[in-house]
């Protein structure tokens, strides 16, 4: 009998300890809007937060522009209310487009201001409910007629990834990568000497050759690649 009582007491202590450990673990877990990860490159903890404010949308979108130009960029895009607005006026050659918070993943861009008529036309057609092919065909026709123009050599920078968490200290989006586009309307592989498909992951190539959307694609290697 004495041995049975001792066993019950010991079992009770084990259950108590396990319950205490579980409670402690739950209390230490991060909230739904932020998480903590460890940087594989330097072993330093970094705080990642959800992109859930207009300020966060603008800060992460500005990562698409050259660092020295960010303060002078005009910033446009959808705010957290779903309204397409101008978030910041600018005075240099860049327009920054924020990520759309109502779409999966992250995608922000920065482009030369001379591309705005082309970009705005695409947004207008999309708002009318046009499909991707209809938008392409319409702008192709308007480019051929001279109604719409893409200045040759104009650039577009795209910063995109599957995650929507960012480092509030650096404004970098977790896992997002930059790629660059240089527009050369009607250019071909023969006129540029560029291949129609990439020969390596970070090599330039010509996409949509011979069309109004012909452009050089450049996708740098990830920063954390060995």
Image (spheres, helix red, strand yellow):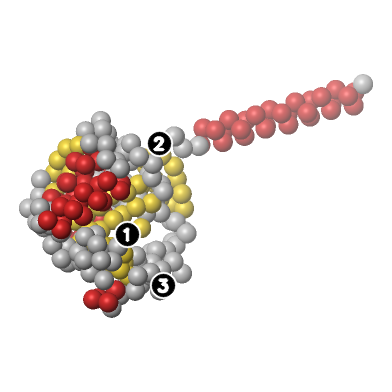
Residue assigned mark 2:
33
**Whole-percent x and y of residue 209?**
28, 66
Residue occupying the point 34% across, 74% down: 195
Question: SS class of the residue under badge 1?
Answer: strand
Q: Nearer the viewer, mark 3 or mark 2?
A: 3
Tag of residue 200:
3
Earlier residue among tags 3 and 2: 2
Residue occupying the point 41% across, 48% down: 162
Residue 73 vertical placement versus 220 (above, below): above
**Mark 3, other Cα within 10 Å: few <14 / some 14–19 / many ≥20:** few
Which of the pair 7/19 is nearer the observer? 19
**Mark 1, other Cα within 10 Å: few <14 / some 14–19 / many ≥20:** many
**Whole-percent x and y of residue 179?**
31, 61
Residue 31 showing in the rendered view: yes
Which of the pair 94/7 is nearer the observer? 94
**Whole-percent x and y of residue 108?**
28, 49
Residue occupying the point 35% across, 66% down: 220
Earlier residue among tags 1 and 3: 1
């Amino acid at each position: 009998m004495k041995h049975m009582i001792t066993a019950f007491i010991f079992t009770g202590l084990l259950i108590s300890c396990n319950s205490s450990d579980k409670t402690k673990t739950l209390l230490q877990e991060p909230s739904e809007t932020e998480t903590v990860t460890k940087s594989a490159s330097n072993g330093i903890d970094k705080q990642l937060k959800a992109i859930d404010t207009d300020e966060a949308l603008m800060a992460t979108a500005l990562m698409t522009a050259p660092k020295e130009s960010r303060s002078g960029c005009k910033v446009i895009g959808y705010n957290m209310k779903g309204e397409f607005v101008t978030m910041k006026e600018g005075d240099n050659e860049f327009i920054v487009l924020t990520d759309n918070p109502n779409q999966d993943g992250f995608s922000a861009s920065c482009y030369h201001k001379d591309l705005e008529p082309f970009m705005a036309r695409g947004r207008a057609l999309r708002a009318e409910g046009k499909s991707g092919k209809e938008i392409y065909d319409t702008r192709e026709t308007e480019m051929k007629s001279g109604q719409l123009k893409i200045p040759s050599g104009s650039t577009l920078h795209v910063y995109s990834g599957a995650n929507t968490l960012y480092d509030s200290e650096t404004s970098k989006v977790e896992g997002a990568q930059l790629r660059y586009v240089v527009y050369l309307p009607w250019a071909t592989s023969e006129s540029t000497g560029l291949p129609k498909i990439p020969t390596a992951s970070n090599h330039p190539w010509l996409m949509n050759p011979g069309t109004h959307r012909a452009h050089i694609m450049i996708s740098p290697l990830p920063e954390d690649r060995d």
